[in-house]
Amino acid sequence: MILYNTTYSVAQEVATDWLRWIKAFYLPAVKATGLTVDHRLLRLLTELDNGGVTYSLQLNFESRTEYETYLAQHAETMQQRIQHRFGGQFVSFDTLLEDS
């Protein structure tokens, strides 16, 4: 199992709208690719007061092949969608993990 994690720090002013949009549009679009087997969206509780809200969006893939297909065919479009909607109101970084 491959876990593709993106950590988002979202500006407090748009955090509610960001969360609603992620659940209503972003996650259904990811699921529609047919490449993920599961996902989780978690809010970090142990964070510094940075004026924002931090979330961990975890996408599970059965194998590295499915992840690489997602990366090659869908990741850029998904990043463009969130950037278009919330550009300048969040920062993010990605982590790739493997179940051991």
Image (cartoon, rainbow, N blue to C red):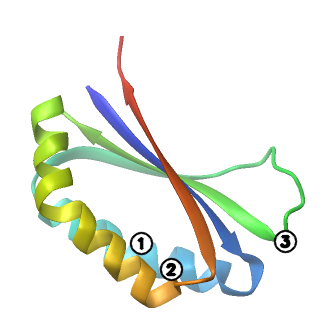
Which residue is located at x 45 percent, y 89 percent? 85
Look at the picture and state if 85 lies above or below 40.
below
Res. 85 mark: none
Disc 2: CA contacts within 10 A as few (<14), some (14-19) or many (>=20): few
Residue 92: x and y, percent? Answer: 55, 60
Q: Quadrant of residue 100?
A: top left
Rendered residue at 10%/34% (across/down) = 65
Tag 3 secondary structure: loop
Disc number placed over residue 20 in the picture, else none? 2
Q: Earlier in the sequence, mark 2 or mark 3?
A: 2
Q: Are marks 1 and 2 in contact (CB under 8 Å)?
A: yes
Q: Using the image, determine if residue 28 lies above or below residue 1.
A: below
* Three-letter amino acid code of the residue under disc 1: Lys
> Which label is found at residue 23?
1
The local secondary structure at tag 1 comes to: helix
Provide the residue designation for mark 3.
51
Q: Is residue 54 above or below residue 46?
A: below
Residue 19 locus on image (x, y percent): 54, 74
Give the amino acid at mark 3.
Answer: Gly
Residue at image location 33% in from the left, 78% down from the top: 80
Question: Camera-side residue: 17 or 86?
Answer: 86
- Horizontally, is 43 left or right of 73 in the view? right
User: Marks 1/3: CA distance?
Assistant: 22 Å
Q: Nearer the viewer, mark 2 or mark 3?
A: 3
**C-beta proximity under 8 Å, tags 1 and 3:** no
